[in-house]
Image: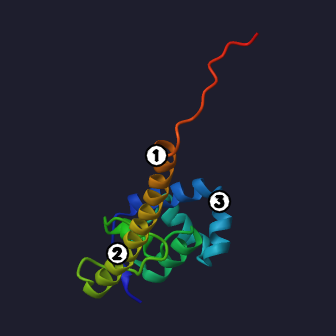
Amino acid sequence: MAGVDGDWDAVSQEIRRLMHAQGMNQAGLIAKSGISKVVVAELQHNKVRRTRTDHVLRALSDALGVHQEHLRAIAQGRVPQDVGEPPIRSDADIAGRLDALDYRMAELTEAVRQVAAMTEVLRRVERALFEGPPPTIDVRTPD
């Protein structure tokens, strides 16, 4: 299996941050990831700095509910990807980067579609407010 070198201080901080955000303890992370207590403790507290396998980082990322390449990206100083986005394994991973661009373009296209739909609704409301008959106001004083 390929090993990953990296910034283990950053990985340790990210693991702790994600665990805290989810109210997860070490035992929960071990149970969800299937990674040994020793390895989880080493990474969580940055006790031992060594190359880690992709399997370990993916399993922990999955257990923490983030993109499977999240911790690898943190270790390598890259911005983590969103869950569901195709993985980019490195800056040189052209195919992965193109897949991620396609994914993001689809997200942007959907966002533009939603903005266009909301804009149409706002135009209808504006027309109803300003182009309809003027409201009648009773200005008589009560007797």
Q: Residues within 10 Å of mark 3 (few under 14, many from 20)?
A: few
- For the C terminus, the quadrant is top right
Q: Residues within 10 Å of mark 1 (few under 14, many from 20)?
A: few
Amino acid at dot 3:
Met
Q: Is residue 141 left or right of residue 15?
A: right
The mark closer to the camera, 3 or 2, is 2
Q: Residues within 10 Å of mark 2 (few under 14, many from 20)?
A: few
Q: In terms of sequence position, does the residue under pointer 3 or pointer 2 come before the other?
A: 3
Amino acid at dot 1:
Glu
Inter-mark Cα distance, 3 to 1:
56 Å
Q: In terms of sequence position, does the residue under pointer 2 or pointer 1 come before the other?
A: 2
Residue 51 seen by the camera: no
Residue drawn at (65%, 59%) of the image: 25
Residue 85 seen by the camera: yes
Is disc 3 placed on a helix, strand or loop? loop
Q: In terms of sequence position, does the residue under pointer 3 or pointer 1 come before the other?
A: 3
Return the x and y of residue 50 as percentages of the image width and height: 39, 72
Residue drawn at (49%, 72%) of the image: 83
Q: Are marks 2 and 1 in contact (CB under 8 Å)?
A: no
Q: Quick check: 104 above or below 20?
A: below
Return the x and y of residue 129 as percentages of the image width and height: 50, 43
Indicate the colouring scheme: rainbow
Amino acid at dot 2:
Met
Residue drawn at (67%, 66%) of the image: 28
List the residue tagged with mark 2.
105
List the residue tagged with mark 1.
131
List the residue tagged with mark 3.
24
